[in-house]
Amino acid sequence: MVLLSLVASHSDIDLETVAKISADASQVASVVLASASPVAGAITLATCNRYEIYCEVPQSEDVAAARSEVISQIAASTGLSQDVISTALVSKTETEVIEHLFSVGAGLDSAVIGEREIAGQVRRALNEAQAAGTATGSLVRLFQAASRTAKDVGSRTSLGSRGLSVVSVALELATDLSRDPDWSTKNVVIFGTGAYAGATLSLLRERAAHHVSVFSASGRAEAFVAKRGGTALDESTLEAALEQADVIIGCSGSDHRLMAADIAALERGTRPLVAIDLALTHDFDPELGALEGVDLINLESVRMAAPEEQAQSLRQARSIVLDASEAFAAEQRERAADAAIVALRKHTQQVLETEVEKVRAQHGCTAAAEEVEFAMRRMMRQLLHVPTVRARELAAAGRAGDYIEALQTLYGLEVESPSAPSVKNASRCPVTGSAAEDAAPAAETGTPDAVQLSRAV
């Protein structure tokens, strides 16, 4: 199987384009799997400054068709042209996919280098894909390995030790722009109740902000404040809260956009306002910053203001990511040999059982027959040892295809992929979300059949 990712992030294109691609594209993975495309599994990672979709396809020849189908579905869901999307999405395959996701999860590809929020977003992306039934076993392992790598970077380096994040940098900018840096006296209104809203509220508490209100266009504010504190707002109380607000923070990315005209119509007098828009698709009208007395902070502002981490910590973190990527890639290559090993063992097992039956038919259950059977089984184990070792060596070197081709040529064996495209229609494990055949833990050869055959032979 081949890994493919299509990436649109702040590193390559402007955030406006990323936002357009992200709009209404959350169901792309499910739609692609339901189509006739060669995609066997898919996971979508969408954050405030990136939209990425990770896919698994049967072979390298399927990459072009898979990319085309994903682009087509994103175009259908967003209304953008396929040319725009194709230009914006950077394709990565195999080891590039692994290293990129590990870097992303560790915060090395973030607007704020070393930020820890992205690690949680990677975990949530996996959980959502498992719940939707779009994650294959290989993709589950990939995202789990990315999370482990992020933890290693966090524990083994000082990168991110200052607790910097998109939210924290934005709040620091707001502090600098405010006449009074004391957050305990400020009236704050948060738009949204998602993960970013939760992180924002936590950081506001650390800054001793006591007057925090929360508005949700979807009506989730009451449940949000019940768990985290604050005051819930609705349509009837929002206007009054905005008239008294010193800081407003957009974290929802919903269709409910606060327009410049809405703020201009309020009876705020000369009260200054800092508006922090952390939503990729904009909670606040960009023209808000043109109003007198209003300072607008957006994701681009955060990226420009984000401090650079220490070069030594960054080098160390990149080294950890590279080592982890190489180790995961090697493990994946070795897994490619599993099906071939199973096929060879099944073939030899069948030959062995045929010959053993002949011995039993001729000599019955005598000591001589048992001795012959024992010798035949021992001989088979010895004969299989070198081919098994060579299979893993060739797979580790990326030459599993040579081994499989040799088996097909010499023995006429049909070697099936352990993760066939039919996985998208298979029953899925309620724990991992992967297909039933991927749910069982792998043993030495990665499949239950291999364990049974190993014991039998």
Image (spheres, helix red, strand yellow):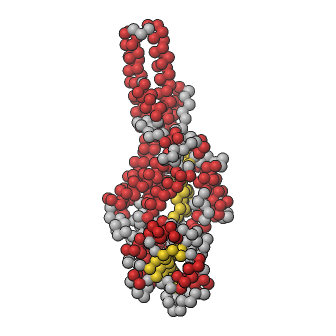
Task: Report the front residue among 365 and 90.
Answer: 365
Q: Is residue 226 left or right of residue 77?
A: left
Residue 301 image position (x, y, % from top left)? 48, 76
Out of 314 and 300, give the one closest to the viewer: 300
Up the image or down, 198 lies above or below 187; here it is: above
Q: Where is residue 416 in the image (x, y as percent from the top left)?
A: 55, 35
Which residue occupies 44% across, 39% down? Answer: 442
Q: Residue at x 45, y 67 (%)?
A: 227
Quadrant of res 310 = bottom left
Residue 171 at what x, y percent from top left?
43, 77
- Dividing the image into 4 quarters, which one contains the C terminus? top left
x and y percent of residue 313 in the render?
34, 64
Q: Which residue lies furthest to the top in this view?
A: 363
The reply, left or right, for residue 328 in relation to residue 161 is right
Q: State whether residue 452 appears in this view.
A: yes
Q: How many marks?
A: 0
The answer to which of 244 and 57 lies nearer the viewer is: 244
Measured along the vertical axis of the image, is residue 274 above or below residue 216?
below
**Is residue 100 in view?**
no
Residue at 65%, 49% in the rendered image: 35
Closer-to-camera residue (318/194) = 194
Q: In this view, does 28 lie above or below 178?
A: above
Q: Residue at x 32, y 59 (%)?
A: 156
